[in-house]
Amino acid sequence: MTAIIVVMLGLIVFASAHWGMHPPSRVETIDSTSLHKGGEFSEANLGTSIAPDGSAVVRVVAQQYAFVPNCVLVPAGVSVTMRLASADVVHGFLIQGTNVNAMVVPGYVTTVHTSFQNSGERLMPCHEFCGVGHQAMWAHVRIVDANRFPFDEAKAKAVSCAQ
Ligand code: CUA
């Protein structure tokens, strides 16, 4: 048994040191009970904005049982930062066919950096059981060619597929 423990601890040290695997180090807290009252995750800020450096910032609220916005619009080939907050319980999200896969824990902001190379539609389901409506909780991510993305509009306000 001691040998098993030593081997497992050794694997953790190996993975941390060799592959740079580690839990998220940048902890950002937020009051999940007042997301709708204003601040970064108020309704008008949800969706995709273009930052001054040209990268995209996607803000999404996860709540029982939907993501808001329900369809995320992003340009292909552009650096994307996804920022998610939960309004109630623990949710999870992944984007099919990408490296995006994270938990959304109430009280914290989940930040994921990625970029999408090809245009197309991808599903973004909640993958953490969050209640009776869990299986119906999913969103779409619509990746469009950069020349079809409304950059000017997204510099002024957040956009999503429904625009
Ligand atoms: Cu949200 Cu499962």
Image (cartoon, helix red, strand yellow):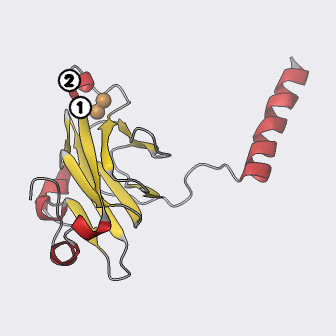
Q: Which mark is residue 6?
A: none
Label 1 CA crowd tier, 10 Å (few <14, some 14–19, many 20+): many
Work out which quarter of the rendered image holds the C terminus and state it: bottom left
Kind of residue at disc 2: Gly
Q: Which residue: 80% across, 44% down? A: 13
Q: Which mark is residue 133?
A: 2
State the image coordinates of residue 4 (x, y, percent, origin top left): 85, 22
Asked whether the viewer can see residue 148, the reply is yes
Quadrant of the rendered structure where residue 140 is?
top left
Whether disc 1's CB lies below 8 Å from ligand 1 is answered yes
Say which residue label 1 marks: 137
Toward the left, the furthest residue is 163
- 144 displayed left or right of 45: right
Q: CA distance from mark 2 to mark 1?
A: 7 Å
Question: Does dot 2 land on a helix, a strand or a loop?
Answer: loop
Q: Which residue: 87% across, 30% down? A: 6
Judge by depth and name the residue closer to the eye, 124 or 8: 124
Quadrant of the rendered structure where residue 148 is?
bottom left
Judge by depth and name the residue closer to the eye, 115 or 145: 145
Whether disc 2's CB lies below 8 Å from ligand 1 is answered yes
Front disc: 2 or 1: 1
Judge by depth and name the residue closer to the eye, 38 or 17: 17
- 99 displayed left or right of 38: right
Name above or below for residue 144 compared with residue 54: above
State the image coordinates of residue 84 (x, y, percent, origin top left): 32, 52
Kind of residue at disc 1: Met
- Name the quarter showing ligand 1: top left
Label 2 CA crowd tier, 10 Å (few <14, some 14–19, many 20+): few
State the image coordinates of residue 67 (x, y, percent, origin top left): 22, 43
CB under 8 Å between discs 2 and 1:
yes
